[in-house]
Image (cartoon, rainbow, N blue to C red):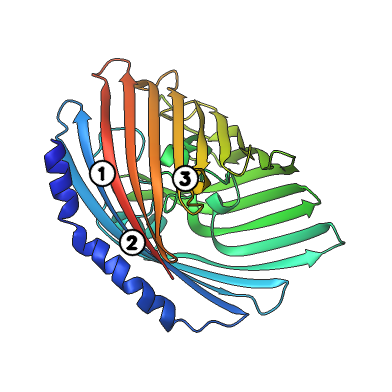
Amino acid sequence: MTRGIFKKILSHQLLAVLIVVITPICVSALDLNEKLTIEGTLTGIYQYGNFDSEGAKDTGRGSGVLDLGVNLHPTDKDEFQITLSYAAGGALNTIAPFSLVPYADDLEDDLKYINGRNRDYLLEAWYKHTFALSKDVSLGITGGIIDATAYIDDNNFANDEVSQFMNEIFVNHRNVNLPSYDLGGVIELGIANFSIRGLMMNTKYEAGDESFKDYNYYALQIGYALDTALGKGNYRIYGFTTSKRFQDWDRTGEERLQGVGISADQRLSSIIGVFARLGWQNDAAVIDHESAYSGGVNINGKLWGRENDEIGIGYAYLPGADKAAIDNTNAIEAYTKFKISDFSDVTFNIQYINDNMKQEEDRDGFIYGIRLNAYF
């Protein structure tokens, strides 16, 4: 089996060569000024799944993603952002037989007909104005097509599927049900080390048979930035609710999605950092998991003399809802990221996912992955 995995990975070496070759070309072609920033990431990923689940065959799949961001900041108080993404392939997301998605990025199917709207590839298009109320107090107001994951449940060590963990549970808390890429607004109040963020979005979810339902999403997060002798830390508590648009367990009415959570990260030294997430949601509507607990460690490459390398290790436990088919889910993920050049890196990743079912056969398996990034 191991020989087969490496054979499949090597078959994608053309993508690796493309990333390494295109990087210096892209970097040298950019001519930025102090008010306009253009950033891009070219990501290639290959995952191989070794599944122990009835009807699931061991297999491998890859994907390629190009993310482009244009940011215009004509003044210190005004900011415009447009984010585009193009992808080919879906990795193992539609094949893996688990309740958790093994690669949290937006892939080929996610970028077409986004949220049931007549829109492809455009992820964000927003404007932000910041009011400086005093030396330590600021108020920011953002409106447009936004991504809730940029404002709620953020975490320094577990929040970026392009450069950190791949599994969705270590990117954002699954129970927060964060919507992305739809119309909304955010108010951000900063008072010294405290921050308060209020978010509202109108979006859609796929209700089946290619039909979509509109709903409103509201969230409030309070954060505190702590600076100690050990290092910097961030502690956040949030709550969310939606409009009454989600099916109840009797299939006769509709309920809200509601919940609360905590997201924290703390640096213990220049080498070691830790993170934790806790979350609970109401199970009046049909959901898989009523709570989720995750945490882990980040190890900086200074430990072996390469400060741009890092290791991440995470564990998550998710108890199932009372009426759900899942009793509980366990997930373990570890990755090692190595810097190749000033504009590229490679990550080796392994995941173990286990869904313990109440009636059906349990599902578990390993997923091995490699990710190549070029930045410009």
Marks 3 and 2, the one that precedes in the sequence: 2
| Residue 36, horizontal then vertical, whole percent | 57, 79
Asked whether 291 or 253 is in front, the reply is 291
| Residue 288, horizontal then vertical, whole percent | 41, 28
On screen, 363 above or below 213? Answer: above
Asked whether 1 or 193 is in front, the reply is 1
On screen, 303 above or below 71? Answer: above
- Residue under numbered circle 3: 304
| Residue 168, horizontal then vertical, whole percent | 42, 41
The residue at 64%/75% (across/down) is 73
Asked whether 49 or 78 is in front, the reply is 49
Asked whether, in this view, residue 58 is left or right of residue 244, the answer is: left
Q: Amino acid at mark 3?
A: Trp
Q: Nearer the viewer, mark 1 or mark 2?
A: 2
Marker disc for residue 5 = none
Callout 2: SS:
strand
The residue at 45%/25% (across/down) is 317
Asked whether the beta carbons under mark 3 and mark 2 sit within 8 Å of each other, the answer is no
C-alpha distance separating marks 3 and 1: 38 Å
Marks 1 and 2, the one that precedes in the sequence: 2
- Residue under numbered circle 2: 65
C-alpha distance separating marks 1 and 2: 17 Å
